Image (cartoon, rainbow, N blue to C red):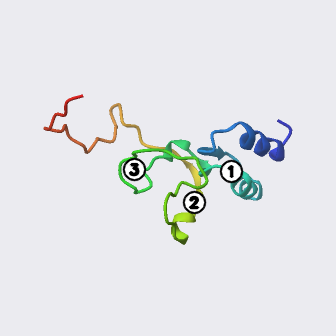
């Protein structure tokens, strides 16, 4: 890649539009990246492993959408809004769920059984 505009064009043409990140010391370029990359989550100097509904405080993730409009039926202004999350960090990473210092899971096995 020759530079930032080419990288942004490549991401917008070939990416998933879910999560993309830039690692840079140049905050002006980071701002352009965050504004111009067409993804739901754009991270600056932080791990893309933060892209998780649970980490966003939305509870358990039941689906992922990269669509622009997802509403159906009568829709008010809030239903027409789309969101782009921009996380600006300083090298943060997500804590592992495995290993000696793993973050424990808080869910427990369900006692109910459902036939398939």
> Local crowd at mark 3 within 10 Å, few (<14), some, or many (≥20)?
few
Nearest the eye: 54 or 94: 54
> Local crowd at mark 2 within 10 Å, few (<14), some, or many (≥20)?
few
Residue 71: image x %, image y %? 52, 58
Helix, strand, or loop for circle 1? loop
Identify the residue shown where x is 74% and y is 54%: 36
Judging by the rendered image, the residue that carries numbered circle 2 is 83
Judging by the rendered image, the residue that carries numbered circle 3 is 54
Residue 14: image x %, image y %? 71, 36
Residue 85: image x %, image y %? 57, 57
Nearest the eye: 97 or 109: 109
> In the rendered structure, which disc, 3 or 1, sits on the residue that comes first in sequence?
1
Judging by the rendered image, the residue that carries numbered circle 1 is 38
Nearest the eye: 15 or 44: 15
Camera-side mark, 3 or 1? 1
**Given the current orientation, which residue lies at the most extreme bottom position?**
77
């Amino acid at each position: 890649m020759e530079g930032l505009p080419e990288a942004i064009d490549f991401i917008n043409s070939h990416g998933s539009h879910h999560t993309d990140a830039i690692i840079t010391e140049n905050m002006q370029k980071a701002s352009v990246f965050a504004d111009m990359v067409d993804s739901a989550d754009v991270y600056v100097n932080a791990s893309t492993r933060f892209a998780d509904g649970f980490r966003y405080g939305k509870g358990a993730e039941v689906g992922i959408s990269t669509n622009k409009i997802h509403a159906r039926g009568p829709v008010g202004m809030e239903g027409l809004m789309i969101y782009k999350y921009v996380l600006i960090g300083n090298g943060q990473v997500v804590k592992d769920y495995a290993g000696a210092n793993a973050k424990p899971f808080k869910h427990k096995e369900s006692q109910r059984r459902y036939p398939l």
